[in-house]
Image: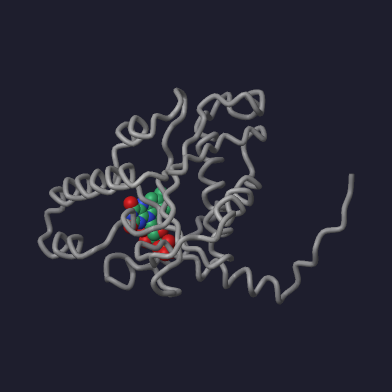
């Protein structure tokens, strides 16, 4: 079956480039709910991601209760404090202490993303020698989600300073689901084309390196 694709012309490419340049990891959210159906629409676009064997292993858990939100936030605070003890350089340690590394208490939506380690879909095609391709597929869905949110003005913050076993148990995830990400979504306090870690002097972007063989 063939169909006529939309025209991805130079103007579109410029806008697409702007989308990528203005996608940010955000930790500062306004206290404003997303409109009804907005999160569903974003997740629906995320599922257009490619996946090994078309297995679509991404699984989303929307965290709705205040109790869950506070438990997740305090867990990440604890893990972040523990991570800080491993930083030996005093200047780095002071810089780390000033960073805000999650918006779990403010973001209107919290979504945990799991990857099914043995989905029925796909009939195991393509993953016999690289089981990790399932999780790679889930990460691609997260990237789709990130961009789908951004075009709607919705910001996303990826939270990984956590113990996946703790979060998996807290969310009572089904057996065989592995935690890939904890995401905060909501409207950002401010817009910028520069990563927060770069603005705060933690880490700037590298120039591109390509090896030729
Ligand atoms: C796998 C992954 C895990 C991340 N975990 C965290 C996190 O725990 N806390 C945080 O503040 N940012 C986290 N980030 C966001 C990165 O810090 C951010 O993507 C990077 O600094 C570049 O900024 P940008 O996304 O705005 O371009 C994570 C990003 C990725 C891709």
Quarter of the image with the N terminus in it: top right
What x and y, as percent, mark residue 58? 54, 38
Q: Identify the coloring.
A: one colour
Closest to the observer: 172 or 14? 172
Q: Is residue 11 above or below residue 50?
A: below
Q: Nearer the viewer, residue 2 or 210?
A: 2
Residue 203 in the image: state x and y as whole percent: 31, 65
Is 123 displayed left or right of 57 in the figure?
Answer: right
Asked whether 85 or 146 is in front, the reply is 146
Compared across the picture, whether 56 is left or right of 180 comes to right
**Residue drawn where x is 32% and y is 73% of the image:** 199
Residue at 54% in and 64% down: 150
* Quarter-of-image position of residue 8: bottom right
Q: Position of residue 104 (x, y in %)?
A: 33, 53
Work out whether 54 lies above or below 96. Answer: above
Where residue 36 appears, x then y in whole percent?
56, 56
């Amino acid at each position: 079956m063939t169909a006529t694709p939309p025209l991805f012309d130079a103007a579109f490419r410029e806008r697409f480039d702007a989308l990528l340049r203005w996608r940010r990891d955000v930790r500062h959210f306004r206290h404003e709910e997303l409109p009804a159906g907005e999160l569903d629409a974003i997740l629906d676009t995320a599922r257009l991601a490619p996946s090994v064997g078309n297995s679509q292993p991404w699984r989303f858990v929307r965290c709705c209760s205040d109790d869950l939100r506070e438990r997740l936030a305090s867990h990440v605070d604890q893990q972040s404090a523990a991570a800080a003890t491993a930083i030996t350089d005093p200047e780095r340690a002071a810089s780390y202490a000033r960073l805000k590394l999650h918006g779990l208490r403010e973001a209107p939506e919290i979504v945990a993303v799991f990857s099914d380690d043995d989905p029925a879909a796909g009939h195991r095609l393509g993953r016999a020698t690289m089981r990790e391709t399932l999780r790679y597929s889930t990460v691609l869905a997260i990237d789709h989600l990130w961009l789908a949110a951004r075009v709607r003005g919705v910001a996303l913050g990826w939270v990984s300073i956590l113990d996946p076993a703790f979060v998996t148990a807290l969310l009572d995830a089904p057996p065989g689901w592995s935690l890939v990400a904890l995401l905060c979504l909501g409207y950002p306090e401010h817009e910028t084309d520069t990563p927060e870690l770069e603005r705060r002097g933690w880490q700037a972007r590298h120039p591109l390196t390509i090896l030729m063989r």
